[in-house]
Amino acid sequence: MRVAWIGDRLADQCLEFVGPMTLAEINDLDLDGFTATLGPVFERSPWVAAALWQYRPFARVSDMGGAIDAVLRRADTDAQLALIRAHPDLAGKAARANELTRESAQEQASAGLDRLSDEEFARFHRLNTAYREKFAFPFIICVRRHDKASILAEFERRLARDADTERRQALSEIAKIARLRLADLLEAA
């Protein structure tokens, strides 16, 4: 197995990915190992990985994506909201204070959110605040599939929605994020 224990981080036990794992290696993990290994895929929410474990063995990586959708759909609203709220604001205070998880920091950097001008940072701050005030959770988008301009456009568009629609959208975005993080963890077949 190509993972290394790095101890407690953000009050969660976690593993650092040393190299890609195979699907067979993932399937062979016991519940604790599976949860520790896949926990970082789900932003500070290892319960999702623990729930995903019951769907093993996975014949294909795409089967894991379907299982993620099922876990998120079947979770009660309180659990869904807790998962959404575990995510940081985009280009928010946590990013500026270097308090993001490694995965979130890399993803935000991929969209240039770590290199904002003061004006851009102020715009993100205004949108984050408006979004949180309206929905009581952070704006979630799979930033690896966007750039600053498209993120800002989505922010504006999605602010017009109702809370239930936006909760479902956030869960869909979390599933996209998880699939990309899984791809980083798993070797190409």
Image (cartoon, rainbow, N blue to C red):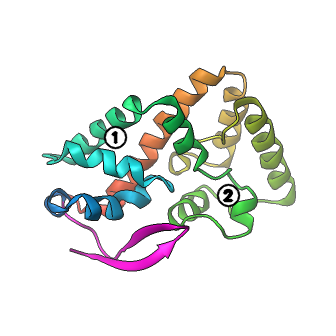
- Region in magenta: 1-22
Count residues near mark 2 (Cα–Cα under 10 Å), then give few for <14, some for 14-19, many for 20+: many
Q: Determine the image quadrant of residue 141.
A: top right
Residue in the picture at 52% in, 27% down: 168
Q: Position of residue 1 (x, y in %)?
A: 20, 74
For disc 1, the marked residue is 68
Q: Does residue 115 appear anywhere in the picture?
A: no
Count residues near mark 1 (Cα–Cα under 10 Å), then give few for <14, some for 14-19, many for 20+: many
Looking at numbered disc 2 in the image, what kind of residue is underneath it? Leu
Residue in the picture at 80% in, 55% down: 121
Q: Determine the image quadrant of residue 92.
A: bottom right
How far is disc 1 from disc 2 in space, using C-alphas? Answer: 27 Å
SS type, badge 2: loop
Residue 189 appears left or right of 153: left
Q: Position of residue 34 (x, y in %)?
A: 27, 60
For disc 2, the marked residue is 113
